[in-house]
């Protein structure tokens, strides 16, 4: 893949043409999405064994913060093996609706089976596609959820994705997130390892710690509540935030952080 420095869009494509490279950024994105899909298709049956022991407590905390309620319409992006979908479908009840979007057909199959076993398949619609964009009209959902998915996107794409999330949430809708969380100035050794691996071997380590609260704030989300946790000493966060024009029932502080919650993922 040709690197064109900080150039984006048309300027980058023009420079590539001058250099004799006829591929566009769209070509690169399509190739990268195909690689991501192949990666998660291969991983789908083993994913819970490899990752869920550490991640499920953080996901459950984020689900509790999101507090999906009966009758709500909820969208989960990157649903993986479907644990989040199952919890959300139970929470919204028979009058609610859950939609899941994930690009991996392997994950789709595993999640489908989970929902069928739980008797919840009729409450959840699954779509196999890549985001962003999110193919729904403005204000379609009361709440959205992402678990260990936001940090997979390139740094330049995260603001675009968060803008899309804001668009499809109704005013005052909530976004729940579980993610690897950058610890700021005092970067922990494992965090450094992740960054190094992600930079040099992105096909092996496809994620890196992100500044969850900062990104939500920059995207215009309000009433951000973030709980700092860790998995194997790697900082992670469970967070919830509101799209603007929210009712003021949650904390009025723009970012309320609780970073004293400790280790959650030491079990193998
Ligand atoms: C690390 S897994 C997390 C799965 C699940 N949320 C969990 O907590 O166990 C990330 C998921 O996001 C999906 N994904 C990655 N990039 C995506 C994209 N651009 N559009 C839609 N889904 C994507 C992958 O297929 C995978 O299922």
Image (cartoon, helix red, strand yellow):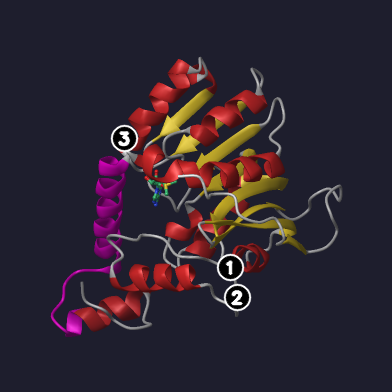
Who comes first in sequence, dot 2 or dot 3?
3
**Decide: marks 1, 2 in contact (CB < 8 A)?**
yes
Q: Which residues are magenta?
A: 17-43
For residue 42: magenta?
yes
Is 94 positioned to the left or the right of 5 in the image? Answer: right
Residue 194 place in picture, x, y as percent: 41, 67
Q: Please name the residue that numbered disc 2 is placed on.
A: 184
Q: How many angstroms separate mark 1 from mark 2 (CA)?
A: 8 Å
Q: Secondary structure at mark 1?
A: loop
Q: Please name the residue that numbered disc 1 is placed on.
A: 211
Q: Evaluate whether residue 136 shows in this view.
A: no
Residue 205 place in picture, x, y as percent: 34, 61
Any atom of ligand 1 within 8 Å of the CB at mark 3? no
Q: Secondary structure at mark 2?
A: loop
Q: Please name the residue that numbered disc 3 is placed on.
A: 45
Q: Secondary structure at mark 3?
A: loop
Q: How many angstroms separate mark 1 from mark 3 (CA)?
A: 30 Å
Quarter of the view holding residue 128: top left
Query: How many C-alpha atoms fall within 10 Å of the one at disc 3: few (<14), some, or many (≥20)?
Result: some
Quadrant containing the N terminus is bottom left
């Amino acid at each position: 893949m040709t690197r064109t420095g900080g150039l984006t869009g048309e300027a980058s494509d023009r420079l590539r043409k001058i250099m004799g490279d006829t591929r566009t950024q769209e070509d690169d994105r399509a190739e990268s999405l195909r690689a991501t899909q192949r990666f998660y298709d291969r991983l789908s049956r083993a994913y819970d064994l490899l990752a869920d022991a550490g991640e499920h407590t953080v996901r459950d905390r984020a689900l509790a913060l999101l507090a999906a309620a009966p009758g709500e319409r909820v969208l989960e992006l990157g649903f993986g093996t479907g644990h989040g979908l199952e919890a959300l479908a139970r929470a919204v009840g028979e009058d609610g609706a859950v939609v899941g979007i994930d690009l991996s057909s392997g994950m789709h199959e595993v999640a489908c089976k989970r929902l069928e076993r739980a008797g919840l398949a009729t409450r959840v619609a699954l779509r196999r596609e890549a985001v962003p964009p999110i193919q729904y009209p403005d204000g379609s959902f009361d709440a959205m959820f992402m678990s260990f998915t936001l940090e997979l996107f390139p740094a330049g794409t995260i603001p675009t994705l968060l803008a899309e999330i804001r668009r499809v949430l109704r005013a005052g809708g909530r976004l729940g997130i579980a993610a690897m969380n950058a610890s700021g100035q005092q970067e922990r050794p494992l965090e450094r390892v992740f960054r190094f691996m992600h930079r040099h071997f992105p096909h092996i380590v496809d994620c890196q710690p992100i500044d969850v609260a900062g990104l939500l704030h920059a995207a215009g989300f309000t009433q951000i509540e973030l709980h700092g946790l860790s998995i194997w000493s790697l900082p992670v966060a469970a967070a919830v935030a509101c799209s603007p024009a929210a009712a003021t029932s949650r904390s009025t502080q723009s970012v309320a952080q609780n970073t004293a919650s400790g280790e959650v993922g030491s079990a193998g």
